[in-house]
Amino acid sequence: MTVRDEQDEAVPDGTYEPSPRRLARERYRRARTRRAFAVAAASSTVTAAVLVTLIVESPGWQRTRDTFLNAHYARLALPKVLDGLWLNLRLLAVCGAVVLVAGLLIAVLRTLRGPVFFPVRALATAYVDFFRGLPLIICILMSVFGIPALRLSGVTNDPVLLGGFALCLTYTAYVAEVFRAGIESVHPSQRAAARSLGLTSAQTMRHVVLPQAVRRVVPPLLNDLVSLQKDTGLVSIGGAVDAVYAAQIIASRDFNYTPYVVAGLIFVAITIPLTRFTDWIAARMNGRQAQGGTV
């Protein structure tokens, strides 16, 4: 009997029947998985118990619970925080779309070749360097309070629009660098092959380089969108009533910080699914790359 026959045998009617060795190996793997799960569950339970004990037994736990984890103020704040959250979600949708388009445009401008495009590359580089170095909170303050101070005709004073404009300015610089990294990761032979087939530089960028570059940078782009979702709360600096500012109103009125905890937990509840989706996309792309598929 050959090794193949020893491992996997076929019964006379042609149906597959695993060999005893394979069955034993699968039983061992299942037992090892169950053992690893039990050890992980036990260690997690012990760690959680230790942390809870340290917190609950601390001298200021009662005061902290009344100030940050008060069920009455949580019920009071939840409807108001959810109303403000609608503004955060709208900002995420609009600013996210603008940032993706503007970031891709800036990245393409930075990768233009030839001396004639040097002024464009220089301006795009200066924009990216400036807004990546400028703290977002300062950018929002300058937009919300500085632009109205100019008293320009036809320019809005709405803190929501001005705060969203500041978010777009800052995150476009970050996203542009992500896109540029993806564009430069495409091997030069791809461009050379496209040009040898008669494609122009613009056609090569559109049909050859950008499709590959965008697929490669999907995980970091999703990470930037997760960060944008959290930073939409900073528009409250200008007076826009979002989830954070709604929590601040209740907290300053009742001198209890539970509304901040409620707002924070809501942001976490939104962020975790986005983060897990990002991890799934990254793992899927890594798996396809390891198998030799299209990246």
Image (cartoon, grey):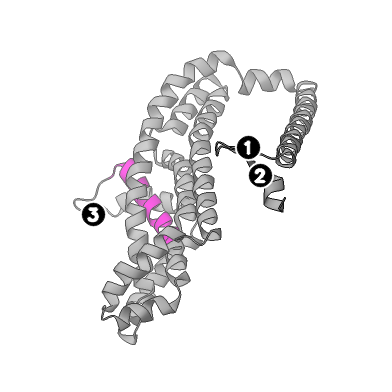
Name the residue rendered at 25%, 46% in the picture. Answer: 156
Asked whether 165 falls inside the magenta stretch, the response is yes
User: Residue 137: in sight, yes or no?
Assistant: no
The residue carrying pointer 1 sits among few (fewer than 14), some (14 to 19) or many (20 or more) residues within 10 Å by Cα, namely few
Q: Which mark is residue 173?
A: none
**Residue 248 vs residue 190, the one in the foreground:** 190
Q: Where residue 152 sits in the image (x, y, percent)?
A: 23, 54
Give the Cα separation between the discs numbered 1 and 2: 7 Å
Give the Cα separation between the discs numbered 2 and 3: 81 Å
Work out which residue is located at the far left of the displayed protein and give it. 154
**Residue 105 vs residue 43, the one in the foreground:** 43
Residue corresponding to mark 1: 17
Callout 1: helix, strand or loop?
strand
Callout 3: helix, strand or loop?
loop
Q: Residue 173 occupies which quadrant of the picture?
A: bottom left
Q: Looking at the image, how many numbered discs can be counted on the residues?
A: 3
In this picture, residue 8 sits left or right of residue 101: right
The residue carrying pointer 2 sits among few (fewer than 14), some (14 to 19) or many (20 or more) residues within 10 Å by Cα, namely some
Work out which residue is located at the far front of the displayed protein and give it. 12
Q: Which mark is residue 8?
A: 2
Q: Earlier in the sequence, mark 1 or mark 2?
A: 2
Residue mark closest to the camera, 2 vs 3: 2
Q: Amino acid at mark 1?
A: Glu
Residue mark closest to the camera, 3 vs 1: 1
Residue corresponding to mark 3: 152
Q: In this picture, which residue range is highlighted in magenta?
A: 157-175
Q: Earlier in the sequence, mark 3 or mark 1?
A: 1
Name the residue rendered at 78%, 28% in the picture. Answer: 42
Q: Where residue 74 sits in the image (x, y, percent)?
A: 53, 18
